[in-house]
Amino acid sequence: MAPTLEVRGLVKEYPGVKALKGVDFAVQAGEVHCLLGPNGAGKSTLIKCVSGVVEPTAGEILLDGKPLPVGKPAASLERGVATIYQELDLVEELTVAQSVFLAHEPRRGPFLDLDRMRRDAAALLRRLGHERIDPRKRIGELRPAARQVVSIARALSHDVRLLIMDEPSAVLDDGEIETLFEVVRRLTAEGVAVVYISHRLDEIRRIGDRVTVLTDGRTAATGLPAATPTERLVELMVGRAVEQLYPERARAAATDDAEPLLDVRGLRRMPDVRGISLQVGAGEVVGLGGLVGSGRTELLRLIYGLDRPDDGEVRVRGRRLPPGRPDRAIAAGLGLAPEDRKSQGLLLDWSLAKNVSLSDLARFQRGLLNVRAERAAAREQLRRLQTVPDDPERIVRELSGGNQQKVVLARWLLHHCRVLLLDEPTRGVDVATKAELYRVIADLAAAGVALLVVSSDNGELVGMCDRILVMREGAVVFEVDGAHASERELLRHAVAPTETADLIEEVR
Amino acid sequence: MSTQSAGDRQAAPPTGEPLTERRLGAFRLQEYALVIVVILLFVAGAILKPDTFPTIDNVRNMLTQASVVGVLAIGMTFVIATAGIDLSVGSALAAAGMFGGILVDPEGSTLLFIAGAIFFATLIGSINAIAIAYGRVVPFIATLAMFSIARGVALLLNDKLPVGLLDLNGGSFGDPAAFSLLWFGTGRIFGIPVSVYVFLGIVIGGWIVLNRTRYGRYVVAVGGNREAARIAGVPVRRTILSVYVLMGVLVGVAAVLLCARLGSASPVSGNLYELDAIGAVVIGGTSLAGGRATIFGTFLGVLTFALIFSLMTQMDLSTEVQQVVKGGIVLGAVLLQRPEAKL
């Protein structure tokens, strides 16, 4: 039987760049085929070719043995190719039912058939095992995982043969990922083929059947079993062995007498943060674990002064920070690398240099800005972080996610930050660049910076942190020494007690 | 061709995009294109009206007239850089002139008039600023309201009548005494009108502030991504507040230049100047969405407008036709800006 999707010798050239240099791979009906590769390897271009958004320069795409018309998204959709993108493309103001049938609403005469829309949406959600999602609810009221399910339901509202998921788990926490996997398993049981893109190797083992690795626009290996050892996959992706993901580092000695660099006392902003106290000492890496929505990001925003607390205070080196004043926080030595680098961390159309220097312009102004000194200083920090490219004149938008994150970090290195708040620093970053970012974190800690790191990747928390705090519903519910922490324990404390038993069972 | 200057032979994820595009390359291109447009327009004028267009007198005239809108356009560049807009500048200009006028009527000095006009325009700008930065009113609405208020005030100040300013410090058309009010509008130094010096000074000052000061960087950062700017420590609200105040000051300067040229303050002057100023900014390449601004582009935009209207006037096209053309050009310029969003 012909595979559901077969790609042969696919080439895509952009002016000046060959994004795909000949990619072959095949996906069988009912399998979850994982697509791996570093950022910029061509994964996005490949799926855009298959979904018809981009027209390939050469090569063939066959669906169920028959050629798929290229460069025609509507044709791809009609033949049963549905794509769910990383950035969910749902409109918050619409209801679930409206979202599912957006642009192909059932009609009766010239009017929308609202009843049928609601009924059919409910049926699709039931098919996915999520009958609890009310079709009349607005998207804005749903949690990320539920939105993901609605996206899938929308894909299913067409007769889907092939479902492409681009980093669907990036916005989900562990519990929600399991829900997502359950949906994927239902679909494959019905014979749908799934292409699954993710940077998290543990997920591939949990959900994948086979793996294809792309590097530099070529297929490095295809059809590997999902059980392929991690080292082998990383080697294929990077082209060499990554000796060590997490750097060795001397754990900060518990210095009880020294004053903590960051001292948070009773910080509260209802309903997200319900009274939190924590300290981070010089050279210490403290992790903040917990589920998405447990209040971690909100806590960082309060500490940094982006939001005003109802109660509580933040002290840096013993000095109290005025609430609601990020500029004063920065002056006191704080830095924040926000969760969403693109929308919160960077000015995408600006040069690297201007992005790096933005918090430190006073330093370059003697009457007028010394643009040359600014560029030189930016270049120095970018080089230190091995940012590629490190040309300070380049526009940030052109950089990959990992390198954009380095631009944000370069800003705080330039500022000689004493306390650095990192919110999901490695989300959407490939393994090789992750290892580099961990190296940077370790170096900063060694230089005496206090780091508070929010992460949904428990492996990362265990691998990097001296101490880990787990948040749940706006409070710290668990604290553990990094050397003694286990991923499973972190997860157990992150989810509410009632859910714990089944979830642990499933994850196992 | 990834640049791997760092020692480690690191797997550098090559970006999927063409690597070549230098910073703001497309943006610069627009400026170069405008220089050519300005030259072509001048050549076209010289061919169509060889006797009257390419003359010293006409050039002088064009520049004198352009300087009023030009000063407004420089201020507007700062406002639009923050992703804002100021629709009240034309009315505010009239109100500022009228305020200065009644202050010096029947007798007073040039200095008092200038101080009065700039004070009143700054006051109007500050009200806009506070409504927008602290009252969180959308700039479009806040300044649209002010558009109406300021025009009403201009008409009320002297019972709908203009104020004559000819006598201030001994001016007379043709040969105004130095530092008389008329001198600012019609006097010359080395054959170049004083108002053109004022305009060029503000262009140069504006370029320096926007490109070579921390404040200018903040202005563009706020327009480019307000949240990212705030996280980087930019005082967002103060920056937004400041651009509308600055706009007010420049409206005052423009009011002085206009009244000085006409020898009077009129409550109906400045009509649709906001469109001229915004049009010049947009033609110059400053993004209406904020985050990108060019003073040099605005300067070229002002020249382009001046040439087009001088040419149309000499071709005996009515003001109604000119109005249609003006709106069309602005619409076209905004349409041309669109594809950049996809880059």
Image: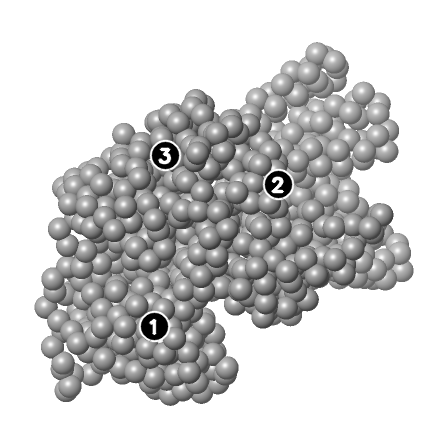
Residue A2 or residue A269, whichever sits in front: A2
Q: Residue A302: percent from the left, percent from the top? A: 42, 76
Q: Residue A5: percent from the left, percent from the top? A: 45, 36
Please tell me which of labels 1 and 3 falls first in the chain: 3
Q: Which residue is mark 3?
A: A25
Please name the residue shown 36% across and 34% down the image.
Answer: A25
Q: Secondary structure at mark 1?
A: helix
Of the residues tagged 1 and 2, which is closer to the observer? 1
Q: Name the amino acid, label 1.
A: Glu
Say whether mark 2 and mark 1 are on the same chain.
no
Mark 2 chain:
B
Please name the residue shown 71% across and 27% down the image.
Answer: B308
What's the CA distance linking mark 1 and mark 2? 63 Å
Of the residues tagged 2 and 3, which is closer to the observer? 3
Q: Residues within 10 Å of mark 1 (few under 14, many from 20)?
A: few
Say whether mark 3 and mark 2 are on the same chain.
no
| In-image side of B150 versus A502 (left or right) | right
The picture quadrant where one finds residue B282 is: top right
Q: Name the amino acid, label 3.
A: Phe
Q: Which mark, residue B281?
A: 2
| Quarter containing the N terminus of chain B | top left
- Can residue A231 be seen by looking at this rendering? yes
Q: Secondary structure at mark 3?
A: strand
Residue B157 or residue A2, whichever sits in front: A2
Q: Secondary structure at mark 2?
A: helix
Q: Which mark, residue A505?
A: 1
Q: Residue A499: percent from the left, percent from the top? A: 41, 78
Mark 3 chain:
A
Q: Name the amino acid, label 2.
A: Val
